[in-house]
Image: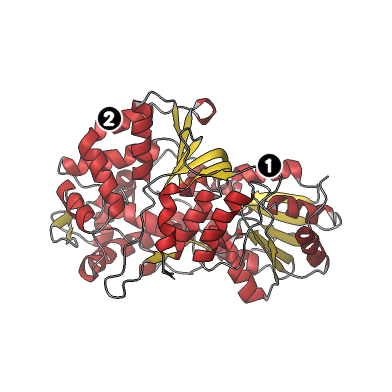
Amino acid sequence: MVDPTPEQREAIATYGDGIDCVLQAGAGCGKSSTLKMIARSDRRRLMTYVAYNKAIASDAKRSFPQNVVAKTGHGLAFDPRHLPRLNRPRQTAHVAAQALDVKRILGVIGSTPSIATDLGPLKAMTYKIIMRVALDTVERWCQSADPEIEARHVPQYDGLTRPEPRAALLALVLPVARAAWTDLLAEDGVLKMSHDHYLKMWALSGPKLPTDVVLLDEAQDTNDVLARVLLDQEHAQRIAVGDSSQAIYEWRGAKDALKQFVRELGAPELTLSQSFRFGPAIAEQANVWLHVIDAPLRLTGYERCESTVGPIDDPDAILCRTNSGAMGIVMESLSAGRKTALVGGGGDIKRLAWAAEALQSGQPTDHPELMGFASWDSVREYAAEEDNSLEVLVKLIDEHGTDRIVEAADALASEDHADLVVSTAHRSKGREWPKVRIHSDFRAPKPDQRSGLVILRREEGRLAYVAVTRARERLDNTALAWVRDVTAVEA
């Protein structure tokens, strides 16, 4: 057993004082081993380890002492009575709209509703699209601690951001979302249940966990619904562990529970700053981003790890900012005859290509990245004027066509047999490779027209920090050289 570092000894001692606490653990800084040390230090008390995903929970069951119950948030909430609705066949938005009878809910008589987009043309809001947005609204609400479904839970869509289109969207979606939740609560409901649905039902019931200690891992990416349940376990000692600088899922409803624990419980905030993943050279690059986003933490590289920073011709992994960027690397690599894997598989790429194909043929799509557009020409126009990430997608679709992109997605290799692994930075979280290159679709922010400041969104800075800390031995972050030009950061 490895001797604890001074920071780890302080964490164990703070646990021994019996108080709630927060551990800010930098990338590769041994947070899991620290939690195991805490669990082994006191085998008399029953502990509940709340893992970020099922794979981590399964590993924890094998590696933590027997006084620890390891589950995901969904595992805590699961009840076998939900199995019949969870195991129903896959239900498309079209089938769900028919089953729930969206037309009746909205009281529509006659033709399909339509709303004006930001660029002016009308977009047909088929009942399938309305149902898709309503279901996404319910999912977002289920991830919150809010008691009722409100306008803020309806997702934002490119092309439907101005007040009039947004108001028209809300008028169509909110009644259907609320009807969908009523159906999900009914024993004889027609909609298929998801795991987030029963988690929300459980949270609304005010559960009390049968435990003495709660250990929350990856707390920076905990949904409000779960954070609220754990914060309310007043009978237990609560320890939250994570890295606020790796909070990269705000866009899908996650919040930084570390800050909530400090704010609501008055929990002391300790740090783990010694990284065991990489050496000083990569730690230095990580600290550049920690400085830019005003994080108090700084990493110390592991002296026994040899790490270098500079151009890499043969990376093990290329990390991209967007799905479109990943798609481009996959196409390029496959064309060169390399066995290529994509973290998460090719499903997202195929769905994006099919959505583009629908718009090209004059059909509407419910894909979240393209739903707010009436035609492919509208996507082109918006990409040229507003959105660099969509510009990459448009270029790929127009150059290669949707059929070739779908073929490329189907030609992907498994990670075990790949010459190159491609991933978005979001999907790379929790993973590591010996040699990593950052892709050029991490675009530099443009100078503000009024102030002249080069302003970086803090979440983008956190994403770059996650990306550069995936490398163990060699890092090529040439694409992020623009960081030296950033003069301000905004929320």
Which residue is rendered at x = 54% and y = 38% of the image?
435
Give the left or right position of residue 113, taking residue 440 as reference.
left
| Kind of residue indicated by mark 2 | Arg
Give the left or right position of residue 17, taking residue 231 as reference.
right
Query: As drawn, which residue projects farthest toward the top?
Result: 337
* Residue density around tag 2, few if under 14, some if 14–19, many if 20 or more, within 10 Å: some
Which residue is rendered at x = 85% and y = 57% of the image?
42
State the image quarter where residue 25 is shown: bottom right
State the image quarter where residue 167 is shown: bottom left
Nearer the observer, 406 or 141:
406
Coordinates of residue 29 in the picture (x, y in percent): 67, 53
Coordinates of residue 49 in the picture (x, y in percent): 70, 54
Q: Is residue 201 visible?
A: no
Nearer the observer, 238 or 199:
238
SS for dot 1: helix
CA separation in Å, label 1 and label 2: 39 Å
Sequence order check: which comes first, mark 1 or mark 2?
1
Pointer 2: what residue?
Answer: 404
Which residue is rendered at x = 30% and y = 61% of the image?
173
Pointer 1: what residue?
Answer: 59
Nearer the observer, 320 or 83:
320
Nearer the observer, 56 or 382:
382
SS for dot 2: helix
Which residue is rendered at x = 62% and y = 62% of the image?
298
